[in-house]
Amino acid sequence: MADENNVTETENTTEPTEQATTPAVEQTAPAAAPKPSAVPKPHAPSPAAFAHKPAAARPAAPAAKHGHDEAAVREAEAFGRVADDGTVYVKEGETEREVGQFPDVSKEEALALYARRFLDLKAKLDALAGRLKSRNVKPREIDESLKMLAEETAAPAVVGDIAALKAQYEELKAAGEAKKAQIAEARKAAMAKAIEGRTAIVVKAEELAASLGDNTNWRSTADKFRALFDEWQEHQRNNVRIDKKDADELWKRFSAARTTFNQARRKWAQARDVERKEARDTKEAIIAEANELKDSTAWGETSRKFNELMDRWKKAGRAGRNEDDALWAQFREAADTFFNARQADRDQISSSEKENLAAKEALLVKAEALVPVADEKAAKHARQELAKIQEEWDQIGYVPRDDMRRIEGRLDAVDKQIKAVEDAAWKQSDPEADARKSSFEEQLNVQLAELDAKIAAESDPKKKAKLEAEKATKEQWLNAVK
C-alpha cells in the first residue's frame, strides 16, 4: 500500500454575517414645499438596521391616509402647538421647545407633520423591541441601534409624548443589555459544547495514534483518520466558532495525532519495502538454484534439495502480491521440470520392476520345488541348484518395493530348509562336537552324584527341595545330550 500524502487543513475562521432587516418606515407624500427658512431642523438619521429610506427633500403634507392611526396622530398633536408664523413647538415636561417651522400651510397640517414624525420615531423603538425578541439578533446590532436611537431621542424634532419616548428608550436600553447578557451566556454554553464536541474528535484521533503497533491495519486506520477530519470540518461548519486560542490548541493536538500516524505509517511502509526487497532477492536466488537443479537425474539427492528450497521459500516472506505470483510461477516451473522427469523415470522403472517380479516369481517356483530334502545327499544337490537360481535371481534386478520382502522371504525359506539338513548332518560328523558332548555328560554325572549325597545328608525340607529341583534340571540336560 502506497503511503498517502498528508493533507493540510486549516481552521475556517470566517463567521457568516447576519443582516438585520426591519420594515422600512413608510414615507409620506410631499405636499407644499416650505420656504428654505421654513425647512424643519435636521435630526439624526434612523438606524440602518431598522429602516433604509432616502432622506426627504421636503416635509410631507399631513393627511389621514399616510399609514398612521388618526387617533395616535391626534394624541401626539396634544403635546405641540404652532405659532402664527409657522413655528412648531413641543411640550417636554414643564418646558416648551421649538422643533421646526413650516409656514405657508395650515397649523393643522404643520402639527400633523411633526406628530407623524414622532410616530415614525416611536415605530423605530417598537421595531427594536421586536428585534430584541429575535433569536438571531447580534450584540453589535443592538449596540449600533441603541446608539443611533440615543441620538434621535436626545432632542427629537417631533411632536408627541417625548418623556414616554425617552422612557421607552431607557427600557429598550436595559432590555438590550439583558439580551446581550443572554446572548453572551448562550454563546458561552454553545462554545463550551462546541469545544466539548471538537475535543471528543481530538481524543479519538489521539487514541488511534496511541494504538499504533505491529498489528495495525494501516489502510483501515487511514480511513478512520480521514473520517475524523471530515467530522472535524463538519463540526466546524455547523457549530459556533470557538475562540482562536482554544481552536488552535485543539487543532494542534489533532494535527499532532495525524502526524504521529503519518510518520508511523511511513516508517512501516519503508520497513515493508525493505522486507519485500529482501524477500524478492532471496526468492530470486532460490529460483536460480532451482534452475540449476531442474535437469538433474540424481532423483533422491535432488528431491531433498528441492524440499530444502521450498522450506527456504516459505521462510523468505512476501515480496508483494503481484511479484510473489510471478516469482512463484518461475520457481514452480523449475520444480515441475525436475519432478515431472523424476515421475517419468519412476513410471519406466515401475514397468521394468513388474517384469522383474514376474521373472523372480518363476524362479521361486523352481526353488520351492527343491524342498523338502530327506538326507545330506539330497541337501547337497538342492544347494547346488539353489545357487544357480540365486545367481540368476541377482541378475534380474529390482522388483516393486511392496513385493520385495514377500519374494525374498520365500527364497530365504527354501535356503533355511536346505541349511537345516546340512547343519544336522555336520553335527553328526563333527569329532569336536562329540568330544564336547562326552565331556559334558561326564560333568553332569559327577554333579548328579554330588547332589544325591547332599540330598541324603540334608535334613532341612526347604534346602532339600531346592537340591532336588537342581538335580531334576541337570537330569534333563543329561537326557538332552545323550
Image (cartoon, grey):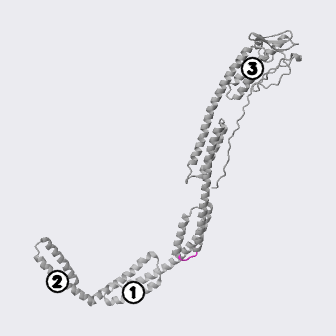
Q: Residue at x 61, y 44 (%)?
A: 253
Q: Which residue is mark 3?
A: 123
Quadrant of the rendering where the C terminus is positioned: bottom left
Q: Give the mark count.
A: 3
Q: Is residue 23 left or right of residue 204?
A: right
Which residues make up the magenta segment? 294-298
For mark 2, give the secondary structure: helix
Pointer 2 or 3: first along the chain: 3
For mark 3, give the secondary structure: helix
Pointer 1 or 2: first along the chain: 1
How crowded is the residue under tag 1: few (<14 C-alpha within 10 Å), some, or many (20+)? many
**Rendered location of residue 387, percent (x, y):** 40, 87
Question: What kind of residue is marked 3?
Answer: Ala
User: Vertical placement of 133 versus 420: above or below?
Assistant: above
**Magenta span main SS:** loop
Circle number at residue 386: 1
Question: What kind of residue is marked 1?
Answer: Leu
**Rendered location of residue 72, percent (x, y):** 75, 14
Question: What kind of residue is marked 2?
Answer: Val
For mark 1, give the secondary structure: helix
Quadrant of the rendering where the N terminus is positioned: bottom right
Q: Nearer the viewer, residue 368 or 263?
A: 263
Q: Residue at x 58, y 52 (%)?
A: 217
User: Vertical placement of 184 versus 457: above or below?
Assistant: above
